[in-house]
Amino acid sequence: MLKKLNWQAYTSKDRNEITEKIKDLISHNDGCIVNFTLFSDLALTLSVEIEEQHILTFHKALSEVLSVDALDDTIINPASNREWIIFLNISFSFGTGKMKRIVPAVPG
């Protein structure tokens, strides 16, 4: 059974820029996004599967990009390759709740 962590994060930076940085951090730490939900431009929820040995490094790198919950590192075994799931909820301070996507007209 997978162990789980719930992290809350907050940023005032650009949503697209932060999303790309987080995607790169997850990939760099051998993680995998297994689910995501975008709540307009207000929030993003990610479910990330990652080996236990990468959690401390991932959290430290994430903390340099976002304001994120503290991690109780006493529960993490840095020598273990056991899979964990991290539920990461990111709130964007400059979100309006009115995100629109422009869909190009397709002839036909």
Image (cartoon, helix red, strand yellow):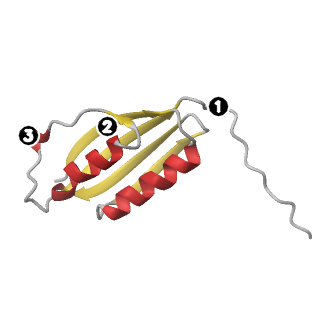
Please give the count of numbered marks on the rendered protein: 3
Q: Which residue position is annotated with label 1?
A: 97
Name the N-terminal-most of marks 1 and 2. Answer: 2
Q: Which residue position is annotated with label 2?
A: 7
Answer above or below: position of 71 versus 59: above
Name the N-terminal-most of marks 3 and 1. Answer: 3
Q: Residue at x 33, y 41 (%)?
A: 63
Q: Position of residue 104 (x, y in %)?
A: 82, 59
Q: Amino acid at mark 1?
A: Gly
Residues at circles 3 and 2 in contact by the CB criterion of under 8 Å:
no
Answer above or below: position of 9 versus 30: above
Quarter of the C terminus within the rendering: bottom right
Q: Position of residue 15 (x, y in %)?
A: 56, 43
Q: Residue at x 53, y 38 (%)?
A: 13
Q: Residue extending furthest front?
A: 64
Q: Which residue position is annotated with label 3?
A: 74
Q: Position of residue 43 (x, y in %)?
A: 52, 36
Neighbours of disc 1 within 10 Å: few (<14), some (14-19), many (20+):
few
Q: Position of residue 35 (x, y in %)?
A: 42, 53
**Is residue 62 left or right of 36 when viewed as pictured?**
left
Q: Amino acid at mark 2?
A: Trp
Q: Amino acid at mark 3?
A: Thr
**Is residue 103 left or right of 41 when viewed as pictured?**
right
Foreground: 20 or 65?
Answer: 65
Nearer to us: label 3 or label 1 = 3
Neighbours of disc 2 within 10 Å: few (<14), some (14-19), many (20+):
some
Q: Residue at x 13, y 41 (%)?
A: 73
Q: Residue at x 15, y 36 (%)?
A: 72
Residues at circles 1 and 2 in contact by the CB criterion of under 8 Å:
no
Name the N-terminal-most of marks 3 and 2. Answer: 2
